[in-house]
Amino acid sequence: MSRRWPRGLLLLMAVSSLLAAAAPLSAAPLLEELDYQMDAWVLRDAARAKLTLKNLGAGRYQAVLSGETRGLAALLSGQRRDSYQTEMVFADGKLKPLIYREETRRRGQRHLKEYRFNHAAQRLELWQLKERQGHLVLKWHTELKEPVYDPLSAFYNCRLGLLGPLKEGDTLQIAGIPYPAPETLEVRLGANTAAGRQVMVTLSNPALAGQKGLIFIIFNGDLVPTQGWTRVLGFGKISGTLLPDGKYLKNGLPEIPSGLKVPEIGD
């Protein structure tokens, strides 16, 4: 004889199944969570930004940098929200990007780009969202013979010392995503002051003032970025300050040999 289950119980079972399916992503250990107040020109607290790093397991990690305008800045920017996300795998002693996404929402419109790194096939692809079609389409591809990094994977590789040690005055050159043109990120280590260690990052970005954009970042003793500033066309100076009560990455990654910590950059 067949058994009929009460509708309420069936609904509860369905909800439980959905929650169980979502659990692995939500339960991914959070290694770092940093919140920043952003000031733009004369506008204080014009936006808030958050940087997170999660351990997805099996040597994979997810870094996300997201930001949202506030107050008058939100009104002027069309309620702009930005998100940059990279999924990486620890291999050959480095964090290699697998998928890097750039997403912007503004005035009800959504723009999404997804860079897919196929290291086995030595191929890098750019997929872009076509809202009218409702899916991503292949826009560009190139060979991937040499290591290439997106900004987030480059950032964590540098902080963890996986691209080599630096001393004051050294400049590290990192190959960025070669679209729409080849790009090299330059990281120059500055002096260690009472405020912290200053690092200057040079990159090509048409939104930044001049042909080369300059970003200045101050790191504390635990290599946590506490302050940063740059100049953007149309806005002037944009600066960010670390807010308290964050979770800091201090002990490196599980794949790094035991006893090796996030390194202090030498003088």
Image (spheres, rainbow, N blue to C red):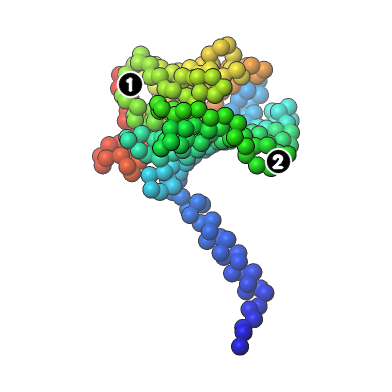
Query: Of discs 2 and 1, which sits in the foreground?
Result: 2
- Say which quadrant the C terminus sits in: top left
Task: Choose between 72 and 185: the one closer to the eye.
Answer: 185
Determine which residue is flagged by label 1.
Answer: 166
Q: Residue at x 56, y 19 (%)?
A: 205
Neighbours of disc 1 within 10 Å: few (<14), some (14-19), many (20+): some
> Which quadrant of the view contains residue 247?
top left
Determine which residue is flagged by label 2.
Answer: 133
Q: Is residue 58 left or right of residue 105?
A: left
> Which quadrant of the view contains residue 163?
top left
Give SS at disc 1.
Answer: loop
**Does residue 131 appear in this view?**
yes
Query: Which residue extends farthest bottom?
Result: 1
**Does residue 247 appear in this view?**
no
User: x, y percentage for residue 100?
Assistant: 52, 35
User: What label sits on residue 41 in the rendered view?
Assistant: none
Q: Residue at x 54, y 19 (%)?
A: 181
Neighbours of disc 2 within 10 Å: few (<14), some (14-19), many (20+): few
Q: Residue at x 53, y 30 (%)?
A: 141
The Cα atoms of the two marked residues, 2 and 1, are separated by: 47 Å
Q: Earlier in the sequence, mark 2 or mark 1?
A: 2
